[in-house]
């Protein structure tokens, strides 16, 4: 199997939509409490073979606890974890078909790179020749052939990360768990490594479950992301859906940048929703699915890049339009973010791609501007 | 060089000066006495160097007058060889016993909740608050025939007659084990305590049982602590004098005791000095190993 033939396959990869596909990992109503603190609160989840799954959330949201339960370092207080059709209750870590890459890498300092990678294979009592061959294969895979005899303290952070990865996949587990695998790397290296990890996962055809607090990391790599908060899943979706169709304000706010305009629903007819908004002083028309009924309080959520900014008023300034004054401009290079103080109070952000190479922008500080958007550019949230 | 450079020089010089005055000079005196012969005089040996007047005058004569008789005696009189071997044996076996005793203690301490670890460390060093000599005297009253241990065992009906423990080698072993335990526990604890728990988890994740994880990861990583602890116990235990003198009996042969007898009972300063110099040479080997182990650990960091 080469990465080339897997490319198109991957685009169609969505076993979670297919009711006939069998999950590799099934988490059933799992709760984990430490004393009076509930770290993981009644969560259920199915992860499929060859999926790259991300558990995303702020620190303390329970994502690491959930992963440690998959690895076997913690037992659920209640609920069931099934991996490959086998109930994991009472099965110690060394008997589970999963391996973990630790956040601290946890490389054995008294062993060289080769020995570290061979460790799990030796524990499995594989024949010597096979261990040697597998170690060489792993070293080649992570491009560390010349460093085979170095000790971990003689390696750079990026090299250590690769040793940890090689050690964790050497046993060819059904599932690889990665706990903040890129957390200790600098930004540039992190971005490179994200794609390396993706390639590797496709090559190996292994199921990856990654824990991260970095939304870019999750968005870039994962097939599906579970956003966690206070021990529960807030939303489980593929990255694009998570970004374009967040189901709650929490998710909308956690993933990327968002403008939330409060309003009251006046009409909801088959996906055509109208809100009265104090923030714009007019109405907001949205083409989106929402359970909000007339009279409900709701929020219109709009990504900054979906708002247009103009010095001239639109044809209908009462609909999907907010007036204000440019208060600050954040120039990031590829985009500029305009912070606009609305005349009705509150602020909105609009980001504009800098497609031409001019330093002087037509819109500048303290300009009176109009922010406009189309009915299908945002969503309506009720919680 | 700047004023800072000078200050740095002073800071370096102080410990060297200390070692020079309080270690090297006394050692040279002992070394010199070891080459002299006994006299019934004050001091009880000759020739004597008069450091002020004739250091250069007739040094050559004096050196020619030095004799190696004392060192020859170390090899001809079997008491010395036997004392050395017996000291090394007692120190060696008690070091080994201590390792088995201290390792579980240190391991338990390192695994204990973080909040109570300082208390546990304090409990290990608590005996140091009482003088070493007094604690050894306390053991006399515990181990003697009418002592606490014997009366307890007799009262419990475990033994009919009090056992002879005091004035035997057993008492010496007990004394050494008791006195030097902290020196073994603390280096082991510091090696075990700084170990990252995730290493054990990683080992288990890769297929180790709890026991295998200990042997393949925990123990190898604690070896620097094992080496440090063993030498910290072994080196002073070889030259131990108080414990064999107070707790041991006539059968107990240890070089520290032999040296003391030579010095005070026989008033043979030159022989005692030769014993001391020879002991130092014997101990040089483990000290050098210990130092190189420490240096290697420094490099690893």
Image (spheres, coloured by chain):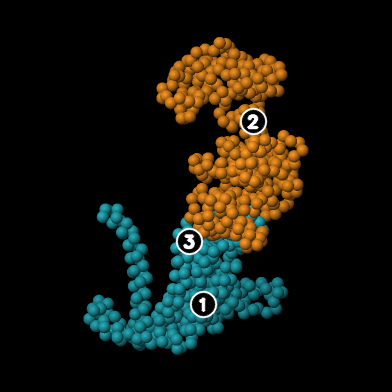
Chain colours: A orange, B cyan
Identify residue for label 3: B297
Q: Which mark is residue A254?
A: none
Identify residue for label 1: B88
Q: Position of residue B184 (x, y in %)?
A: 54, 65
Dot 1: what SS?
helix
CA distance for labels 1 and 3: 27 Å
Q: Are marks 1 and 2 in contact (CB under 8 Å)?
A: no
Q: Position of residue A264 (x, y in %)?
A: 65, 17
Question: As drawn, is A93 to the left or to the right of A373?
Answer: right
CA distance for labels 3 and 2: 53 Å
Residue B152 seen in the figure: yes
Q: Residue at x 51, y 25 (%)?
A: A351
Identify the mark nearer the N-term, 1 or 3.
1
Dot 2: what SS?
helix
* Label 1 in the same subunit as label 2: no
Identify residue for label 2: A241
Residue B41 occupies which quadrant of the picture?
bottom left
Residue B152 occupies which quadrant of the picture?
bottom right
Q: Nearer the viewer, residue A158 or B28?
A: A158
Q: Nearer the viewer, residue A82 or B264?
A: A82
């Amino acid at each position: 199997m080469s990465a080339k033939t897997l490319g198109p396959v991957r685009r169609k990869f969505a076993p979670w939509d297919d009711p006939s596909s069998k999950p590799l990992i099934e988490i059933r109503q799992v709760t984990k409490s430490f004393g009076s603190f509930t770290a993981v609160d009644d969560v259920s989840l199915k992860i499929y073979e060859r999926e790259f799954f991300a558990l995303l959330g702020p620190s303390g949201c329970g994502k690491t606890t959930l992963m440690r339960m998959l690895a076997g370092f913690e037992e659920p207080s209640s609920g069931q974890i099934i991996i490959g059709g086998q109930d994991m209750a009472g099965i110690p870590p060394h008997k589970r078909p999963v391996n973990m890459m630790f956040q601290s890498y946890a490389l054995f300092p008294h062993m060289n790179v080769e020995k570290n990678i061979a460790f799990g294979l030796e524990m499995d009592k594989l024949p010597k020749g096979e261990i040697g061959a597998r170690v060489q294969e792993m070293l080649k895979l992570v491009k560390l052939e010349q460093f085979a005899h170095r000790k971990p303290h003689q390696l750079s952070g990026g090299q250590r990360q690769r040793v940890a990865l090689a050690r964790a996949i050497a046993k060819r587990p059904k599932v690889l768990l990665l706990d903040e695998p890129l957390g200790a790397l600098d930004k540039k290296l992190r971005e490179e490594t994200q794609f390396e990890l993706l390639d590797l996962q496709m090559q190996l055809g292994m199921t990856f479950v990654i824990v991260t607090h970095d939304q870019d990391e999750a968005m870039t790599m994962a097939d599906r992301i579970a956003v966690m908060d206070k021990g529960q899943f807030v939303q489980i979706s593929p990255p694009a859906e998570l970004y374009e169709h967040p189901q709650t304000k929490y998710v909308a706010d956690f993933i990327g940048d968002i403008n939330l305009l409060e309003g009251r629903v006046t009409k909801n007819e088959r996906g055509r929703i109208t809100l009265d908004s104090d923030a714009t002083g007019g109405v907001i028309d949205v083409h989106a699915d929402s359970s909000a009924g007339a009279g409900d309080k709701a929020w219109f959520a709009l990504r900054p890049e979906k708002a247009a900014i103009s010095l001239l008023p639109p044809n209908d300034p009462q609909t999907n339009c907010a007036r204000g004054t440019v208060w600050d401009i954040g120039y990031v290079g590829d985009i500029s973010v305009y912070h606009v103080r609305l005349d009705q109070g509150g602020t909105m952000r609009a980001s504009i791609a800098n497609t031409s190479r001019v330093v002087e922008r037509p819109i500048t500080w303290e300009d009176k501007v109009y922010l406009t958007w189309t009915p299908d550019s945002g969503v309506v949230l009720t919680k | 060089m700047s004023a800072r450079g000078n200050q740095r020089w002073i800071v370096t010089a102080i410990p060297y000066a200390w070692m020079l005055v309080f270690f090297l000079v006394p050692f040279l005196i002992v070394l010199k006495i070891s080459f002299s012969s006994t006299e019934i005089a004050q001091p009880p040996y000759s020739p004597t160097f008069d450091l002020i007047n004739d250091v250069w005058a007739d040094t050559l004569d004096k050196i020619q007058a030095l004799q190696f008789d004392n060192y020859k005696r170390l090899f001809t009189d079997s008491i010395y060889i036997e004392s050395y071997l017996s000291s090394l044996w007692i120190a060696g076996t008690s070091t080994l016993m201590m390792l088995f005793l201290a390792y579980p203690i240190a391991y338990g301490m390192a695994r204990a909740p973080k909040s109570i670890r300082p208390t546990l460390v304090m409990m290990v060093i608590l005996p140091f608050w009482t003088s070493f000599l007094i604690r050894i005297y306390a053991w006399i009253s515990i181990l003697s025939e009418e002592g606490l241990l014997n009366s307890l065992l007799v009262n419990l009906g475990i033994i009919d007659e009090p056992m002879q423990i005091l004035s035997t080698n057993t008492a010496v072993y007990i004394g050494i084990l008791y006195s030097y335990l902290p020196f073994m526990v603390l280096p082991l604890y510091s090696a075990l305590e700084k170990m990252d728990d995730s290493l054990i988890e990683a080992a288990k994740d890769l297929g180790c049982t709890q026991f295998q994880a200990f042997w393949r990861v925990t123990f190898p990583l604690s070896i620097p602590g094992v080496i440090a602890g063993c030498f910290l116990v072994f080196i002073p235990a070889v030259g131990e004098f108080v414990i064999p003198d107070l707790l041991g009996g006539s059968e107990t042969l240890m070089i520290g005791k032999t040296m003391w007898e030579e010095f005070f009972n026989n008033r043979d300063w030159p022989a005692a000095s030769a014993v001391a110099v020879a002991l130092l040479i014997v101990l040089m080997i483990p000290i050098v190993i210990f130092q190189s182990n420490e240096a290697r650990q420094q490099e690893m960091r």
